[in-house]
Image (cartoon, rainbow, N blue to C red):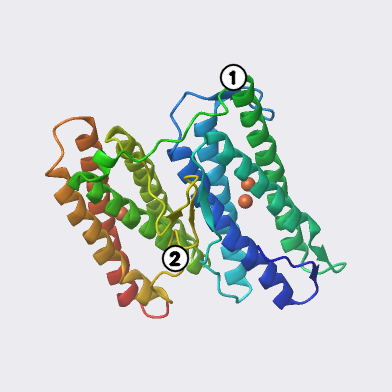
Amino acid sequence: MERIKTIKTEEDALKLLNIALEHEWAVSFEYLIHAYSMPKAKFFYRDPIMKIRADARRQTIQIGIDEMYHALQLGIIITQMGGTPSFKTDEVIRYPRIIDNLERDKMTEDLVTSLYQSAEFEEGAFPKIRNMVLNISYDEVRHSQQFVAMMESMREEKADDELMFQSGPEAAGKEEVRLLHEIMTMENEIMHRYLKYTILFSGHQDLSQRLFKNSIDHMKHWDKNAGALIKMGDVIRIENSEKDDAGVEKSTKAMPDSYPGEDRLTALVTLVPAEQAIIDKYDRLIGMIPDGEIKDQLMIQQGLDREHVFTGGWLLQNARMIKGL
Ligand SMILES: [Fe+2]
Ligand SMILES: [Fe+2]
Ligand SMILES: [Fe+2]
């Protein structure tokens, strides 16, 4: 991660915000990958802030969602300043042992806290940005403390050597697993595409919030599908990753670094075909899955995507009809 210390000009401010944004995209994604590779409700810890016994996996997901809100805040302010938000991401890593991932997450939090807290703003320069950056930094401080508590509790329970879920070679060869991975990629892409449009149209609040709602729907699908993969004997994949001899996976291109659409019409026109492609992929997958919980869930998700097709079609038609938008 690049560093920028002194903020004097608008260019400095935009640079800091975009460095931070690239980081927030990557960590929101990385934390979710880490969480989705851990068993549910198995590792509990005493949360130092909430003062409750909490599930480490669940809280890691919550932290990932916090990071996504940070990304949104940054993207919106960059757009308002006339800049272009970056969708590039930093490196994403997964270690075989759960605790090593938590250690990385904690380190990441400390690194970004220092990026935010060491930025020196000239007196009176960009007060709102300065305030935003400080406010975000204290979320990172909290996250760091939470990751520390998770690790302490794992050490106390002698769970240091507990492993993340691994991809079973037999499961990974199955057609339905392959399809589900493809759907995961598509869900992740469209979730971020909607986030881009949420940012792009942030000056048009009702449209922006509507697109944000669809993004959240896809985030939930991604979450459910990650659980389905575990039930099928596999685990969420990190795209374009390389695994070293120690089993550490690294990718510098785990997500797309750009999404189509630069203005209202060129953005909205992309949604229906993208949703339809996901619906078609679900059709193929659902046809291969036996009746039961997973199939029911997939059908609910596909149904919601059909809702998005309906809504998305009208968003485009209405935008074309009204002059002066
Ligand atoms: Fe963050
Ligand atoms: Fe954080
Ligand atoms: Fe959808």
Q: Is residue 229 left or right of residue 193?
A: left
Residue at figure coordinates x 11%, y 44% from the top left: 287
Residue at figure coordinates x 63%, y 25% from the top left: 155
Q: Which residue is at the far front? A: 245
Q: Amino acid at mark 2?
A: Tyr
Q: Which residue is mark 2?
A: 197
- Crowdedness of circle 2 by 10 Å Cα count: few (<14), some, many (20+)? many
Q: Quadrant of residue 73?
A: bottom right
Number of numbered discs present?
A: 2
Residue at figure coordinates x 72%, y 65% from the top left: 3
Q: Nearer the viewer, residue 98 or 208?
A: 98
Where's residue 131, x and y in %? 75, 56
Q: Which residue is mark 1?
A: 157
- Position of the N terminus, as image quadrant, is bottom right
Give the Cα separation between the discs numbered 2 and 1: 45 Å
- Lower sequence index among marks 2 and 1: 1
- Crowdedness of circle 1 by 10 Å Cα count: few (<14), some, many (20+)? few
Q: Nearer the viewer, mark 2 or mark 1?
A: 1
Q: Amino acid at mark 1?
A: Glu
Residue at figure coordinates x 79%, y 70% from the top left: 7
Where's residue 133, x and y in %? 71, 57
Element at badge 1?
loop
Q: Is residue 128 left or right of residue 45?
A: right
Where's residue 15, x and y in %? 67, 72
